[in-house]
C-alpha cells in the first residue's frame, strides 16, 4: 500500500528511516478516544529517532528532510480525516521553511489553506478541527486561510509574503489552484527582478544592522546574523526570482558560482544546520541563538574536545566564525553579480586604472583573468588602488573569486619580495581607507596569508564576557580606533588620544602595534612576549629601522602595562608613577603606548570603555609625562606632591568664597595619606561639604556629578565603627550601580572619609537628577539605621554572567613603603560581592584603605589596600586567615 506522501508525489523515505506509519495513523483516527495520544506518541518516537541519528553523525541534510517528510505524513493524515470530502476545493500548502522541505526539530510549521471562494462558512468547522488537532498533538503550526485574490493582494504589498509564497509546496488538493497561485505571484505580474532585488537587499541591510553588522557577536544567531542561514536563503530567493532556479547547484550552470564556491556554500550551510539542529535538541524548543548557556554543551554534542591551548567550545566557535566569514564573502559576491545582471546597464563604460585593473559600475576588476599569475604582487596592489580611489564601492565579484583562487601565490617567496613589502607598508601608511582595506584583505583571505600568524587568530574566540569579538575582529577594531584618532574629523570621540595620535611622526608604528598586539593568542605562553618577537621580525623584514622595529615590539610586549597600572595600582603613590616612568623610558614610548591602550580597550568590548577609564588613563599619562620631564634623578616625592596639592586646593576654595578659617579645623583631621590620595578638586569638594555640615552631625553624605566628566562621586563621612563600606556597597549594588573606585581614608578623629566613584551597571553615566537624589536618600537612610537590620542585595546576576564559573584567586603582597598590604582578588562577578568582601574584612579585623574595582566581563578583578586596626601591614597569620576566608566564602555564589 502506498503512503500518503507517495500519493501526492513526495519521495518515499528509506524504509530504515521510517518513523511513522501512515496507514496506522489513518486507522487511529477512526477511534475518537485514540488519535491524539497515538499521534503524539508517533511524533515523539520520530523525534527520538532523529536525535539518535543526529548523534550518530547521520548527514544533517538527510535529517531536516526526514523531519519534513514525517510532518507531511502526520498533517496529511489529519487533513484527509477532517477536511477532505468536507470542504470543496480546499488546497493545503506548505510555506516558508516547511515549504522548502527543511525542518529542524522545533522549526515553525507554516501552513496555508487555499479556498476557492471567500467566506466559505462550511469550511470553518472542518479546518478549525484540523488545526486544533495539530495543536493538540504538539505541532506548533502557523496558519493562514486565503483565497487566490487574498494571496495576490498581500503579496503585491509585502515582499516577505511574496517570498513565502515563492517557497510554497503543494501538500494536498487542487494542483490547478496551486499552479494559479504560482502564476499570480510570479515576476510577470508583480515584484519584477529589479524591484524584488532592491527590496530584499534593503531587508538584509536592516537585518544585519540588528546584529551590529558583524558576524562576530559573542552569542550569534545562526539564522539571522551576517553570514547565517538567512544570507544563504537570500541568494536562493534571488536566484528563484531572477533565474527561475529551485536549487543552489543551478547557480553553477548560470555562471554565478564555480563548483568550488558551491561546495563552500553547501558545506557552510551544513555546519549551520548541524548547529541549529543541535540547539533545538539541547533546548527542547526553537532556538537560533548560540547563547553561552548552550555553547559548551553543543561543542561536546558535536564531538569537540578540549586541547592543550584551546577549549572545545573555542574550537567550535572558531569554525563557526570562519565559516560565516566565508559565507559573508559569498553573499557579498553573489549580491553584486545579481545587481550587475539585474540593475546595471550592460553598456556601462569601463575606466582603465593602470595596466592591470579597471573599474566598472564603481567596482574594481582585473583586465583579464591571468593578472595574478602574471604578476602576483597585484594581489596587494589591488587593495592599494582601493585606498587611493575611495569613490570605488569595492572589488568586482568575479575578481573576488579570482583573488580567492590565487591565494596559493602568497607564499614565503611572495612575503620576502621587497616590492610586496613596500606595497603592504604603503597600504598601512595611506592617508585614508586603511581600516576598510585591512578588513577586506582579511575577508578575502589575503591578510592571514601575508601574515601567517594573523591567519591563526582568524575566527578565534575567547570564551568569556570580556572579549566581545574574535581576536582578528578585535585587532582590526583596534587599528580602526587608531585610524580614527589620526583623523581630525573624529577628534570629538576621544580628544586626548586624537591630539597625541596626530602628533606622532610615524602613525604606522601604532598601527603595527595594534596589528600584532594579540597575534600570539592561543599559542600558550605569554602572548605579549611571543607577539613582540613576531612584530620585530616582521618590521625588520619590511625594511624598517631597528629603532622603529624595536619600538613596535616594545608596544606589543607592554600593551597591557598602562591599563593594568591605571586600574590596579595606586596612582597617588609617587613610587608607582616613578616605576612606570622608568619602564616607559621616554615621552615617545609613552605617547605610542597611550594611544594603543585607549584603542585596545575601546576595541575589546563596546561596554568596557567609560569615562572612568578615560580619566584614569589620562591621569597616568599626565603624571608619567611630568615624571619623565623631571628626570629619573629628580623623582617626585610625597612632600612636594602634598605641597602642590594644598596650594591648588586653596586657590579653588578661595574662588568659592571660603577663607582659611573655614578649612583650618577640617584639614587638621586630614592625614598625610588623605592629601596624597586625592586631587585638589576632590579635597575642595570634601572641605566645602564638611564646612557646611553641623558640628554634631556624625554622618555626612553628598553626591557630586560634576567632579569628573561622566562619573558620579559619592562622599561619606562616618564613624569608623559604622562599617560604612559594607552598607554603602550593598545599597549601591541593590540600586544597580557599579563602584569603579573606592577610597577609605581614616581621619584623626575616629571618622573615615570615603569617596566612591560610581556608574550605572551598564557603564553609562548617572544623568537624571532624580536618580542622584535617590542615591543620596538611600545611602543616608541606610547609614543612619539603628535597628540592626542587615542590608541584603536581592538583585540577580545577569544570565550571561551566571554561565561562567570563575575560580577564586587571592594574592597578597606587602607595600613596605606605605606600610600596608595589597590584596589582589579574582572572582566571579555577582551582585553583593563587594559588600560580602567588606564583611569578611570586618570579621578578620582588617581595615580597608583603598580599593581599585575592575569588572572584566564575568570576572571581578579587584585590588584592596588593607591594614590592621592599628594601621600596620597584615602579618603572615592574618594574611593566610584572610585568604582562606575569602577563598572559602566566595567560592560559593549562593553565599553572596
Image: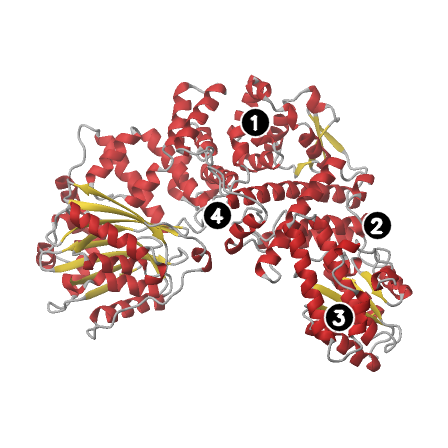
Mark closer to the chain start, 2 or 4: 2
| Residue 352 x %, y % | 72, 28
Viewport quadrant of the N terminus: bottom right
The image quadrant that residue 701 belongs to is bottom left
Residue bearing the label numbered 4: 468
Q: At numbered mark 1, what does the secondary structure look like: helix, strand or loop?
A: helix
Residue bearing the label numbered 1: 450
For residue 144, the mark is 3
Side (left or right) of 818 relative to 6: left
Instruction: Answer above or below: position of 319 versus 71.
Output: above
Q: Measure the C-alpha gap from mark 3 to mark 1.
A: 55 Å
Q: At numbered mark 4, what does the secondary structure look like: helix, strand or loop?
A: loop
Q: Measure the C-alpha gap from mark 1 to mark 4.
A: 26 Å
State if disc 4 and disc 2 touch (CB < 8 Å). Answer: no
Using the rendered image of the protein, determine whether residue 523 is visible from the camera's viewpoint: yes
Q: Residue at x 22, y 45 (%)?
A: 822
Query: What colour scheme does the image use?
Result: secondary structure
Q: Measure the C-alpha gap from mark 3 to mark 2.
A: 26 Å
Instruction: Answer above or below: position of 355 versus 846.
Output: above
Amino acid at each position: 500500500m502506498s503512503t500518503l506522501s507517495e500519493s501526492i508525489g513526495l519521495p518515499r523515505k528509506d524504509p530504515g528511516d521510517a518513523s511513522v506509519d501512515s496507514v496506522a495513523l489513518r486507522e487511529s483516527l477512526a477511534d475518537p478516544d485514540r488519535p491524539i495520544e497515538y499521534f503524539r506518541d508517533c511524533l515523539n518516537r520520530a523525534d527520538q529517532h532523529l536525535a539518535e541519528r543526529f548523534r550518530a553523525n547521520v548527514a544533517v541534510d538527510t535529517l531536516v528532510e526526514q523531519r519534513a517528510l514525517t510532518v507531511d505524513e502526520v498533517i496529511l493524515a489529519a487533513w484527509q480525516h477532517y477536511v477532505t470530502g468536507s470542504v470543496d476545493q480546499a488546497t493545503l500548502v506548505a510555506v516558508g521553511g516547511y515549504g522548502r522541505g527543511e525542518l529542524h526539530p522545533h522549526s515553525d510549521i507554516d501552513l496555508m489553506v487555499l479556498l476557492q471562494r471567500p467566506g466559505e462558512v462550511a469550511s470553518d468547522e472542518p479546518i478549525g478541527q484540523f488545526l486544533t488537532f495539530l495543536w493538540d498533538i504538539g505541532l506548533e503550526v502557523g496558519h493562514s486561510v486565503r483565497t487566490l485574490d487574498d494571496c495576490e493582494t498581500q503579496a503585491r504589498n509585502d515582499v516577505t509574503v511574496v517570498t513565502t509564497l515563492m517557497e510554497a509546496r503543494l501538500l494536498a488538493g487542487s494542483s490547478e489552484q496551486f499552479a494559479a497561485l504560482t502564476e499570480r505571484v510570479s515576476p510577470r505580474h508583480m515584484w519584477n527582478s529589479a524591484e524584488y532585488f532592491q527590496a530584499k537587499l534593503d531587508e538584509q541591510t536592516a537585518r544585519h544592522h540588528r546584529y551590529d553588522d558583524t558576524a562576530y557577536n559573542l552569542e550569534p544567531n545562526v539564522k539571522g546574523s551576517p553570514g547565517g542561514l538567512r544570507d544563504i536563503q537570500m541568494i536562493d530567493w534571488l536566484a528563484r526570482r531572477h533565474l527561475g532556479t529551485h536549487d543552489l547547484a543551478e547557480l553553477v550552470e548560470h555562471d554565478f558560482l564555480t563548483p568550488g564556491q558551491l561546495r563552500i556554500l553547501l558545506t557552510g550551510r551544513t555546519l549551520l544546520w548541524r548547529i541549529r539542529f543541535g540547539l533545538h535538541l539541547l533546548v527542547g524548543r526553537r532556538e537560533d541563538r548560540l547563547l553561552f548557556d548552550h555553547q559548551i554543551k553543543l561543542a561536546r554534542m558535536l564531538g569537540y574536545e578540549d586541547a592543550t591551548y584551546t577549549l572545545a567550545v573555542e574550537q567550535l566557535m572558531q569554525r563557526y566564525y570562519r565559516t560565516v566569514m566565508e559565507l559573508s564573502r559569498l553573499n557579498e559576491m553573489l549580491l553584486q553579480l545579481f545587481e550587475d545582471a539585474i540593475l546595471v546597464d550592460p553598456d556601462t563604460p569601463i575606466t582603465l586604472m593602470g595596466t592591470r585593473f579597471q573599474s566598472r559600475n564603481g567596482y574594481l576588476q582585473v583586465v583579464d583573468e591571468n593578472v595574478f599569475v602574471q604578476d602576483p604582487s597585484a594581489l596587494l596592489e589591488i587593495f592599494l588602488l582601493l585606498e587611493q580611489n575611495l569613490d570605488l564601492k569595492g572589488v568586482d565579484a568575479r575578481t573576488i573569486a579570482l583573488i580567492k583562487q590565487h591565494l596559493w601565490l602568497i607564499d614565503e617567496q611572495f612575503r620576502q619580495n621587497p616590492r610586496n613589502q613596500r606595497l603592504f607598508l604603503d597600504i598601512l601608511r595611506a592617508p585614508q581607507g586603511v581600516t576598510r582595506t585591512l578588513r577586506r584583505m582579511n575577508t578575502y583571505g589575503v591578510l592571514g596569508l601575508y601574515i601567517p600568524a594573523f591567519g591563526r587568530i582568524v575566527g578565534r574566540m575567547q570564551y568569556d564576557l570580556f572579549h566581545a569579538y574574535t581576536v582578528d575582529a578585535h585587532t582590526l577594531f583596534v587599528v580602526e580606533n587608531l585610524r580614527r584618532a589620526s583623523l581630525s574629523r573624529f577628534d570629538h570621540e576621544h580628544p586626548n588620544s586624537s591630539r597625541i595620535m596626530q602628533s606622532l611622526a610615524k602613525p604606522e608604528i601604532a598601527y603595527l602595534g595594534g596589528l600584532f598586539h594579540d597575534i600570539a593568542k592561543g599559542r600558550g605562553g605569554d602572548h605579549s612576549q611571543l607577539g613582540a618577537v613576531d612584530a620585530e621580525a616582521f618590521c625588520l623584514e619590511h625594511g624598517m629601522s631597528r629603532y622603529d622595529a624595536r619600538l613596535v615590539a616594545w608596544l606589543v610586549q607592554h600593551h597591557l602595562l598602562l591599563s593594568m597600572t591605571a586600574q590596579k595600582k595606586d596612582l597617588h603613590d609617587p613610587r608607582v608613577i616613578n616605576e612606570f616612568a622608568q619602564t616607559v623610558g621616554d615621552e615617545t614610548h609613552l605617547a605610542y603606548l597611550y594611544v594603543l591602550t585607549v584603542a585596545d580597550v575601546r576595541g575589546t568590548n563596546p561596554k568596557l570603555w567609560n569615562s572612568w577609564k578615560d580619566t584614569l588613563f589620562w591621569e597616568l599619562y599626565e603624571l608619567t609625562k611630568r615624571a619623565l620631564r623631571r628626570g629619573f634623578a629628580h623623582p617626585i616625592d610625597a612632600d612636594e606632591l602634598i605641597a602642590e596639592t594644598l596650594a591648588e586646593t586653596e586657590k579653588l576654595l578661595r574662588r568659592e568664597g571660603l577663607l582659611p578659617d573655614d578649612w583650618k579645623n577640617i584639614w587638621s583631621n586630614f592625614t598625610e595619606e588623605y592629601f596624597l590620595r586625592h586631587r585638589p578638586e576632590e579635597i575642595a569638594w570634601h572641605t566645602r561639604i564638611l564646612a557646611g555640615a553641623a558640628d554634631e552631625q556624625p554622618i555626612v553624605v553628598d553626591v557630586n556629578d560634576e567632579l569628573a566628566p561622566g562619573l558620579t562621586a559619592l562622599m561619606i563621612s562616618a564613624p569608623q565603627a559604622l562599617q560604612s563600606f559594607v552598607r554603602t556597597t550593598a545599597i549601591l549594588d541593590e540600586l544597580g550601580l557599579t563602584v569603579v573606585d573606592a577610597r577609605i581614608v581614616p581621619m584623626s578623629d575616629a571618622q573615615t572619609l570615603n569617596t566612591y566613584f560610581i556608574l550605572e551597571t551598564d557603564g553609562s553615566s548617572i544623568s537624571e537628577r532624580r536618580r542622584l537624589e535617590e542615591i543620596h536618600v538611600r545611602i543616608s537612610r541606610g547609614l543612619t539605621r539603628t535597628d540592626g537590620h542587615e542590608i541584603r542585595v536581592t538583585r540577580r546576576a545577569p544570565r550571561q554572567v551566571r554561565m561562567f564559573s570563575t575560580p577564586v584567586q587571592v594574592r597578597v603582597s606587602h607595600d613596605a613603603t606605605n606600610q600596608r598590604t595589597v590584596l589582589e582578588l579574582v572572582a566571579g562577578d555577582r551582585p553583593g560581592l563587594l559588600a560580602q568582601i567588606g564583611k569578611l574584612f570586618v570579621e578578620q579585623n582588617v581595615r580597608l584603605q583603598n580599593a581599585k574595582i575592575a569588572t572584566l566581563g564575568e570576572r571581578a578583578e579587584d585590588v584592596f589596600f588593607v591594614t590592621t586596626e592599628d594601621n600596620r601591614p597584615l602579618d603572615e597569620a592574618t594574611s593566610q586567615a584572610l585568604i582562606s576566608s575569602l577563598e572559602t566564602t566566595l567560592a560559593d555564589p549562593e553565599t553572596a
